Amino acid sequence: MRKELVIELGIIFSILIALLSATSIVVTSQTSVFPSTLTLSWYNSNIEMYSSFTTYNPNIFAGGLGGSFYGLVYAYSAIVNVTNSQMIPVIVVSWNFSPPDWQQVWQKQPINVTLIIRNDTGWSNGQPLTAYDLMATCLVLDMFGAPPFPNYTIVNNYTLVETWPKGELSPILYTCTLINTAGLGEVAIIIPYQVWKPIINQILGNWTEIQNTSNMKLAKQIINNIRTEIKNFRPNPVTYPYDGPFYLAQLTSSEIILKKNPYYYDAKYIPFNQVIVYQYGQSDLADAAITSGQVSLDWSGFTGLSPTQLESLPTTLELIKIPQPFGWALAFNLKDKWLRLLQVREALAYILNRTAIAAVGGPLASPVHIPNAIPNESYYSFMRTPQYLSSLIPYNTNWTKAAELLESVGFYNKSGVWYYPNGTLFTLVIGAGAPPPQAYAMLEEIQKELEAFGINVQLNIYTVVSQWHQAWQNGTGYDLWFENWGSSYSPDTAPWSLVLSYFGGYPWNVTQWDENLTLPNGTVIDFYKLMQETQSPNSTQQLIQANQELSYYMNHYLLPVLPLVYIDNYVIVNPSMLIAAPPANSWIWDEAQYGIGGTAMIQALIDYWYVPLYKSTIVTTTSVITTTTTSVATTTTMTTATVTSTSATTITSMITTTITKAVSSLPIIIAAIVIVIVVIIAAVVLLMRRR
């Protein structure tokens, strides 16, 4: 009997093991749809500082983790959904502008912005994040600007009021206004008040003098002194707190380990338990970690690969392209008397094939469809009216039109070669400052196309920065310059500043242009004035009209540049490691356009993608138990007399059970059932043999 009992117990034990194994498989299937670790690759030229807490200074103004690590170790107050320019909350959950008619009086009186922050999030040392931390961050950031600054009033631990000087907060450029206020100017909440209290007290103690713009010399002196104190500040690196989803847990010469911040408001719903940042002292090693599939994702603001590397990515990695209003252009040197002729500049536009130029520019290059048009981005759609678009010239490749334009101003073609009206060979020198390989390939394509048309072209490539700056300053050594145009995400108004300031005289006058244009009828167009209206409009209508006018004149008169290609931003995703990642068309990836180094993408990826996704796999069932008990209620009056009353109270208790859904686990469950059936059959056979 004892032997039989042992056999029976063994059979039962086997069945239990099988059931437990099946359960384990199902549980594994539930959690495997989410990544537990996020891995990144980082090229760090100063690994020694980040190799241990002994050498590490957490002060981000002295080399501590910041910049590319925002969204990981520091939380943004709010971020902008780039696809629609709408501000969405992170730590700051709501904002309010006052007085109620602030949109009418903003140019005449100060405006208050009330920021309400979460009351359920904290620093990694357990300290709650409060309005004092928000104020501390603002004050420190102010020390790297110029007065007047907003004044700050803490109403309570979760309410901060910013009082901005008159004329600073435009309701017309509302997204920009929100970025500067609720969004802290694209900077995360980086200053723990309790740690930085000595610096904060120093700022507040000098605040009156700092804000006194009538004595700017004293204000600047105080600010410079405090700025030095900020840069020299060295908090304890071991106990230093972080308010983002993760905190710095470990430093080695090869890895930076970030652990989940248990006090972060979304912590229990974040599937990533840690972030491992592989750090390399050589850029090629950091790049190799990405291309070999060792990391979860990469983007241009963190490590960044060259177009050549992006072209040869393995098929196991996904390249997600993110359009941006930025690219390569030819700037005309208007010291060349022939290029001052509109017809010559137009002819060059008709000669060049922007599609062919983009084709050699790498996987991120695409042709500009209409040169100097307001970029075709969703956040500029309100300015791209049908009437405006129909007024522009697309300058599609047309050599016949180009020849007619040149001939109209005295140029002539002889045996396939073009000559100036004075009989000398039509020659263009194109300058460029150390262009990267794909840019150089586009430059060679430009040369090839112009020479095929019959224009003699020479390339003048500068490798020393001071030399090409000197060429710009003097306007010598080139007829055209191959350089960037546009900028990154810029809500509300098109990115004209680089074209009109950088090329128009700051810091060097690449185009030798005075930012004015005389039309054939003698009217003088002041481009600088138009640009000012796009940046500080008096109305939405003026904003739209100034952008459209500026674009129209730039397009029709090609002053001062000819945009040729767009260069997209990008994200590289490793689907095998970043499981359940957003699809390529998700707004999450467009966040690589926003924040310091594009790290708003990380904040959005965690809080607006994985957290809701994880929550969607949670099913909560509630059972209700009703009981009656006697409670004692104590009421204290204003005279401190205590009145005690007894009453019968019905108390409803809820027992909540949380179950994680099995996602795509049906095949595994079936396999588990099969295993159990097999074990049971085996048990039956053994029992039959025993009998």
Image (cartoon, rainbow, N blue to C red):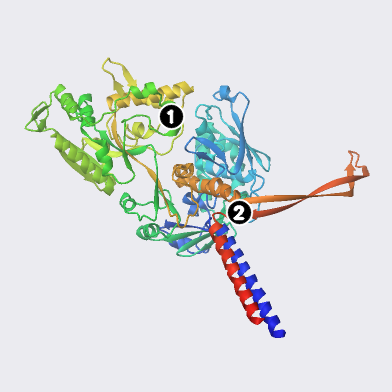
Amino acid type, label 1? Ser
Q: Answer left or right for 202 relative to 435.
A: right
Q: Is residue 529 visible?
A: no
Q: Earlier in the sequence, mark 1 or mark 2?
A: 1
- Furthest toward the left, the residue is 415
Q: Answer left or right for 448 relative to 275.
A: left
Q: Position of residue 517 (x, y in %)?
A: 30, 22
Q: Quadrant of residue 162?
A: top right
Q: Is residue 352 visible?
A: yes
**Front in this rendered view, residue 622 or 633:** 622
- How much space separates mark 1 and mark 2, taking CA atoms? 41 Å
Residue at point 63% right, 26% down?
A: 99
Q: Position of residue 190 (x, y in %)?
A: 55, 48
Q: Answer left or right for 372 relative to 581.
A: left
Q: Which residue is mark 2?
A: 661
**Front in this rendered view, residue 91 or 196:** 91
Q: Is residue 262 above or below residue 431?
A: below
**Front in this rendered view, residue 34 or 292:** 34
* Secondary structure under the numbered disc 1 in the rendered image: helix
Amino acid type, label 2? Lys
Q: Is residue 464 above or below residue 638?
A: below
Q: Which residue is mark 1?
A: 381
